[in-house]
Amino acid sequence: MTLPVDRLREPAVRAFVAALNAHDREAFAAALTPGATMSDDGTERDLGQWTEREVFSSNGRMAVESEDEGGLALVATYSNDTWGAMRTAWRFTVEDGKVARFETGQAPVE
C-alpha cells in the first residue's frame, strides 16, 4: 500500500516528496535549508549532482510505503529511468521547517 503524499505527517518531508515527485526543481530547492547535505548508501554525496542525476534527469519518484519517527523516517519504492525500482529507506533531519539533511539507501528486506 502507498501512503498519499498529502498524508505524510512531517510538513518538510511532505514538501520534499511532493517536489521530488513533481520534478519541480524550484519547490525542491525551497524544501531544503541552505547548505543541506545528503548521503546515499552511507556515502556523502553532492546534493546538487545527486538530485540532478537520480531525480531530475532520470524521472525519479517515490511511492511511500510507511513512515516512522513522526514522519522523519520513510520506506519507499524509489524508481527512476536509470535504475528501475528499488525499496529504499529515507531518514530526514529538519531544521526551521525545511530538510537540512537526508540519508537514503536500500531498505532491509522484510
Image (spheres, rainbow, N blue to C red):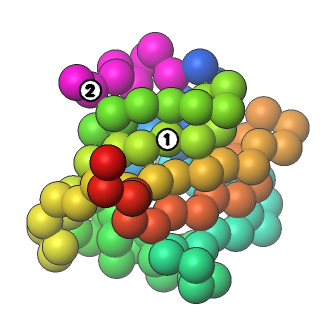
Q: Secondary structure at mark 2?
A: loop
Q: Residues within 10 Å of mark 2 (few under 14, many from 20)?
A: few
Snapshot quadrant of residue 76? top left
Position of 42 with respect to 109 (left or right) is right
Give the residue furthest to the top. Answer: 7
Q: Which residues are magenta?
A: 1-8
| Contact? badges 2 and 1 (CB < 8 Å) | no
* Whether residue 20 can be seen here: yes
With respect to residue 62, does 108 lie above or below?
below
Q: Amino acid at mark 2?
A: Thr
Q: Which of 31/10 is in front? A: 10
Q: Which residue is mark 1?
A: 74
Name the residue rendered at 77%, 43% in the picture.
Answer: 94
Position of 43 with respect to 106 (left or right) is right
Give the residue furthest to the right. Answer: 96
Mark number, residue 92: none
With respect to residue 33, does 7 lie above or below?
above
Name the residue rendered at 34%, 20% in the picture.
Answer: 4
Q: Which residue is mark 2?
A: 2
Q: Is residue 32 magenta?
A: no
Q: Position of residue 47 (x, y in %)?
A: 58, 73
Q: Position of residue 78 (x, y in %)?
A: 28, 54
Q: Secondary structure at mark 1?
A: strand
Q: Earlier in the sequence, mark 2 or mark 1?
A: 2
Kindly report the distance in space between the C-alpha atoms of the residues bearing marks 2 and 1. Answer: 11 Å
Position of 45 with respect to 58 (left or right) is right
* Whether residue 23 can be seen here: no
Q: Quadrant of the N terminus?
A: top left
Q: Which of 63/48 is in front? A: 63
Name the residue rendered at 32%, 63% in the picture.
Answer: 56
